[in-house]
Image (cartoon, grey):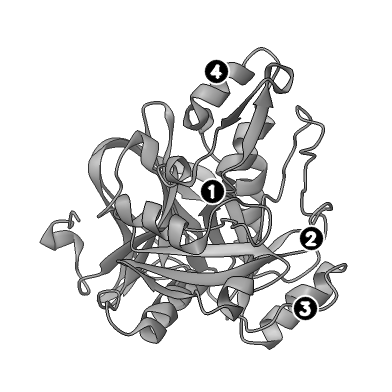
């Protein structure tokens, strides 16, 4: 795994652990077993995966959460009625809410357990396949913990048309472009009020679709294909534990909970080693840290590959540069984050550093 130069590790080394979130097994509407899915992840060099079957924690109940080869499998659940809106991906819970009809109830119950979660595919819009209607989020007054900024399966289905469907079946990852601007704008606004973590997810099911009137069936989204799309890079203070699963699970949960991670589109480049932080006097601020404005901050980013780096404040570009490094000094308040683009597509999306107006 590539490390940034020493000058971009001011404040101490961070250890990266790359994995994938949001996937389903044969315990709900997927087709793979936990050992099979973990093996695919292991073959691709992933260190962890998060299984989130609908409505239950069956894999955890059966003792399948744990080490599978070199991969740590954590188990959460996608809450909310499967054929309706308001899906919520919950982590670090021991039971799912009995009533999953009202978002305010299941979000509250997750938080009361000490768990956390994120809205799944919040602005989903799709009508190309009758049996795959959209499942957007509508309960925007509920105090959620996080939001899925980019969902690989949703973007594939949303862009599906009768003219391009064969091409999309053959090349399922070419449809990945960038997150929905509506979702990004909502997320930026939320972070002005309180910290809201941004995630990327693959929504893997490994489904089979009929073609030519059902004469043939094609599995377009094998788990191994989707594991080459949107990845989550955890930033840890020490290496992800290789022996003690309870400790490793806690490390993964803590990083996911606090926004100590960024998302990348693996298809346009391997993002391992990317860093974004700010120096506040002698203190290093990492994504989802919050500080009051008034003193000068220096934002810094380092990329392992040439990219178009964009520093944004409250969703508006402040600085664009082509290369592998970015620095910017300011005392301006706002929600500051980095996007990186390659090959005309979105590549990396960081959680923000929140700089709030100084209080009297």
Mark 1 to mark 3 CA distance (whole Å): 24 Å
Mark 2 to mark 3 CA distance (whole Å): 20 Å
Numbered disc in front, either 2 or 4: 4
Identify the residue position indicated by label 4 in the image.
Answer: 167
Viewer-closest of 350 and 34: 34
Screen quadrant of the N terminus: bottom left
Q: Residue 49: give x, y in percent of width and height.
A: 45, 62
Identify the residue position indicated by label 1 in the image.
Answer: 202
Viewer-closest of 258 and 321: 258
Residue 140 marker: 2
Residue 97 marker: 3
Residue 215 marker: none
Q: What element carries label 4?
A: helix
Q: Is mark 1 on a helix, strand or loop?
A: loop
Q: Do the residues labelled 2 and 4 touch (CB within 8 Å)?
A: no
Numbered disc in front, either 1 or 2: 1
């Amino acid at each position: 795994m590539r490390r940034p130069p020493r000058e971009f590790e001011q404040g101490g080394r961070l250890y990266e652990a790359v994995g994938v979130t949001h996937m389903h097994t044969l315990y709900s509407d997927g087709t793979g077993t936990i050992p099979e899915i973990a093996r695919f992840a292991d073959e691709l060099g992933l260190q962890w995966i998060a299984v989130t079957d609908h409505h239950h924690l069956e894999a955890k109940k059966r003792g399948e959460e744990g080490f599978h080869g070199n991969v740590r499998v954590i188990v959460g659940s996608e809450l909310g009625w499967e054929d309706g809106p308001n899906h919520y991906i919950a982590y670090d819970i021991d039971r799912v809410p009995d009533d999953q009809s009202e978002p305010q109830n299941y979000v509250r119950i997750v938080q009361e357990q000490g768990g956390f979660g994120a809205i799944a595919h919040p602005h989903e819009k799709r009508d190309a396949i009758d049996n795959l209607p959209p499942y957007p989020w509508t309960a925007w007054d509920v105090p959620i913990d996080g939001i899925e900024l980019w969902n690989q399966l949703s973007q594939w289905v949303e862009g599906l048309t009768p003219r391009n469907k064969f091409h999309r079946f053959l090349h399922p990852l070419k449809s990945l472009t960038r997150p929905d601007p509506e979702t990004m704008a909502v997320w930026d606004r939320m972070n002005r009020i309180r910290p809201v973590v941004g995630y990327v997810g693959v929504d893997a099911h490994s489904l089979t679709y009929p073609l030519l009137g059902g004469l043939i069936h094609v599995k377009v989204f094998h788990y191994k294909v989707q594991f080459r799309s949107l990845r989550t890079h955890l930033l840890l203070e020490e290496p992800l534990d290789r022996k003690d699963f309870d400790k490793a699970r806690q490390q993964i949960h803590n990083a996911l909970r606090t926004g100590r991670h960024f998302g990348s589109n693996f298809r346009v480049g391997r993002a391992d080693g990317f860093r974004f932080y700010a120096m506040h006097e002698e203190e290093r601020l990492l994504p989802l840290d919050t500080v009051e404005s008034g003193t000068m901050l220096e934002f810094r980013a380092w990329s392992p590959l040439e990219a178009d780096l964009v520093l944004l404040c409250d969703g508006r570009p402040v600085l664009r540069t082509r290369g592998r490094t970015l620095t910017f000094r300011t005392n301006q308040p706002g929600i500051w984050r980095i996007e990186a683009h390659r090959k005309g597509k979105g590549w990396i999306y960081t959680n923000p550093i929140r700089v709030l107006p100084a209080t009297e």
